[in-house]
């Protein structure tokens, strides 16, 4: 379970990014977080990864209070969260296989386990035959699939995606969404921060709309009721 | 730390060095220069100290006594002086021995006949002396003034200045080398931290990804630490090897070119020098590498 309890975040520059955000996301949910730029989505994303500390309020991730988490425990906490970004963030000097294996190597998995799981992950995202390719040889959609496979490599209970379709054409964007849904159906909690109105409308999932650092609506089967 | 993590860090660290060739070489070069100088100074200082010690054991204080002092009294004094801390050894030289020594030294090749006539009437009668060797030449002045106070003593001969200036010179050399080495160590640390900094900048993206995936500090820092340490170790091994190669050749050169010095100078054995120089140099290299990289990492890579 993920929960935010009256979270405020004011940057040292004086900019107030979040002003009293409270929300609960249950295990296995699929949630869109939408809003214009500057609404506080990205701050929320970073708070969940403990990349930032809230000015006040409490954040619970996988039932742990992030405020009480010691610094050296952060890596372990992050292993419970898969992350996907708009710009994929793959290692350009390594093959697809290596990129996915890297995630497992980082957490100290044995080569035997890595050899077993990487092909499974590649099959899951539909890139079984691309293991030896380098990221630059792949299309945007394929690169995002690799990023997804990497995010799932350590079987995290939560998947965070920051504008995962931002750099993709509609067809590829939709395919990534379907993949996220499939991952969700396997039991992973999925949180997608996005701008993509059509996709949000089409998916009919829970939508949390943010504006100026507060949640303005939270609908269980919503569309993108985006107002200025 | 897992074994696989260790090998990962080692491999990535080596990769960093090669990827970052120019700066790695510059860092290695600086450490090499620094430790080469250190090695040269160390060799000189150790040899110097050995020579000073050797000279100190030859330089001594000679004490002559009033004519009415009997041999027993002198031997009694000898026992008292021997108890002093700075005294290494003390020898009694009787008038007969002094005469024999004199003959030996000055009329080695001459006709002993003339002199042997004097044997029964020793011209050095009353010149019995105590020859004192010190274990610390800096205490010589103190000993001399003590001896001069004694009523039985007629004269004290000592060669203070040589011993003192030798000790002073050796000390000066140590200070100068210490100063130069300190500066070079600082430069080396700065360069290594720069090299590591460049590595961090180049791999910024990768580091960010690693942190998102949940890599521990050790895992992220390890490769850079390895990089720094390897640079440090290579930078210290090179000068030690060069010095080891040069040491005996330089001594040989000095001895053949300046053969006059043959009897004056005794050089320290190569093994004695390198038994200390090798571990100390490697230790300094390791330290420079570790401090240089770790400091930068602490500043720039935090989860």
Image (cartoon, rainbow, N blue to C red):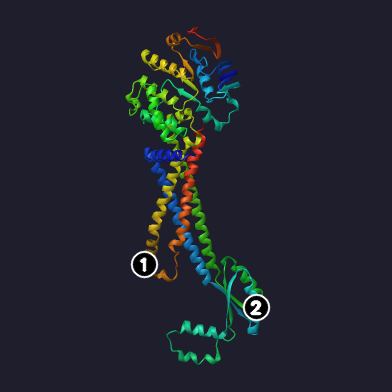
Q: Residue A178: give x, y in percent of width and height.
A: 41, 15
Q: Residue B170: give x, y in percent of width and height.
A: 51, 60
Mark seen at residue B256:
1
Count of numbered marks: 2
Badge 2 is on which residue?
B77
- Res A137 quadrant in image: top left
A33 or B267: nearer the eye? Answer: A33
Subunit under mark 1: B
Please determine whether, in this image, residue B103 is positioned above or below residue B240.
below
A65 or B165: nearer the eye? Answer: A65
Local packing at callout 1 (Cα closer than 10 Å; few below 14, some 14-19, many 20+) is few
Q: Residue B34: give x, y in percent of width and height.
A: 44, 49
Subunit under mark 2: B
* SS class, disc 2: helix
- Res A62 quadrant in image: top right
**Precedes in sequence: disc 2 or disc 1:** 2
Please determine whether, in this image, residue B14 is positioned above or below residue A73.
below
B122 or A103: nearer the eye? Answer: A103
Please determine whether, in this image, residue B253 is positioned above or below residue A75.
below
Calculate the distance from the C-alpha at mark 2 to the C-alpha at mark 1: 46 Å
Tags 2 and 1 in contact by the CB under 8 Å rule?
A: no
| Residue sitting at x 42%, y 26% | A150
A102 or A196: nearer the eye? Answer: A102
- Res B77 quadrant in image: bottom right
């Amino acid at each position: 379970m993920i929960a935010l309890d009256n979270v405020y975040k004011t940057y040292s520059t004086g900019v107030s990014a979040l002003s009293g955000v409270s929300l609960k996301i249950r295990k296995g949910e699929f949630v869109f977080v939408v809003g214009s730029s500057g609404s506080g989505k990205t701050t929320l994303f970073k708070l969940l990864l403990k990349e930032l500390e809230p000015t006040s309020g409490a954040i619970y991730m996988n039932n742990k209070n992030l405020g009480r988490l010691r610094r050296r425990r952060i890596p372990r906490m992050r292993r419970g969260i898969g992350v996907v970004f708009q710009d994929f963030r793959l290692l350009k000097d390594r093959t697809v296989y290596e990129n996915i294996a890297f995630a497992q190597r980082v957490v100290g998995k044995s080569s035997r386990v890595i050899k077993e799981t990487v092909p499974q992950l590649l099959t899951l995202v539909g890139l079984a035959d691309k293991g030896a390719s380098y990221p630059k040889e792949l299309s945007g959609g394929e690169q995002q699939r690799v990023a997804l496979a990497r995010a799932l490599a350590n079987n995290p209970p939560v998947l965070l995606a920051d504008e995962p379709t931002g750099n993709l054409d509609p067809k590829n964007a939709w395919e990534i969404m379907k993949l996220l849904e499939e991952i969700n159906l396997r039991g992973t909690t999925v949180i997608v921060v996005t701008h993509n109105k059509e996709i949000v409308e089409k998916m009919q999932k829970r939508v949390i709309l943010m504006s100026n650092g507060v949640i303005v609506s939270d609908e269980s089967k919503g569309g993108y009721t985006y107002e200025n | 730390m897992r074994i696989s993590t260790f090998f990962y860090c080692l491999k990535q660290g080596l990769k960093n060095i090669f990827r970052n060739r120019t700066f790695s070489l510059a860092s290695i070069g600086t450490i090499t220069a620094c430790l080469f100088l250190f090695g040269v100074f160390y060799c000189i200082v150790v040899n110097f100290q050995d020579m000073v010690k050797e000279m100190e054991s030859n330089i001594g204080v000679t004490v002559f006594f009033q004519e009415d002092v009997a041999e027993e009294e002198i031997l009694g004094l000898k026992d008292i002086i021997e108890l002093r801390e700075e005294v290494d050894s003390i020898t009694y030289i009787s008038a007969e021995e002094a005469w024999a020594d004199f003959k030996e030294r000055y009329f080695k090749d001459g006709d002993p006949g003339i002199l042997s006539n004097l044997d029964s009437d020793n011209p050095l009668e009353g010149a019995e002396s105590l020859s004192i060797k010190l274990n610390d030449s800096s205490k010589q002045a103190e000993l001399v003034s003590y001896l001069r106070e004694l009523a039985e003593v007629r004269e004290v001969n000592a060669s203070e200045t040589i011993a003192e200036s030798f000790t002073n010179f050796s000390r000066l050399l140590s200070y100068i080398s210490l100063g130069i080495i300190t500066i070079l160590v600082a430069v080396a640390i700065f360069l290594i931290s720069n090299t590591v900094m460049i590595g961090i900048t180049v791999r910024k993206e990768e580091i960010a990804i690693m942190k998102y995936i949940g890599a521990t500090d050790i895992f992220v820092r390890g490769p850079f630490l390895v990089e720094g340490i390897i640079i440090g170790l290579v930078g210290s091994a090179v000068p030690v090897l060069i010095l080891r190669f040069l040491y005996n050749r330089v001594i040989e050169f000095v001895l053949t070119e300046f053969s006059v010095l043959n009897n004056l100078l005794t050089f320290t054995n190569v093994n004695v020098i390198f038994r200390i120089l090798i571990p100390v140099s490697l230790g300094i290299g390791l330290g420079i590498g570790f401090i240089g990289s770790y400091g930068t990492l602490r500043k720039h890579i935090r989860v």
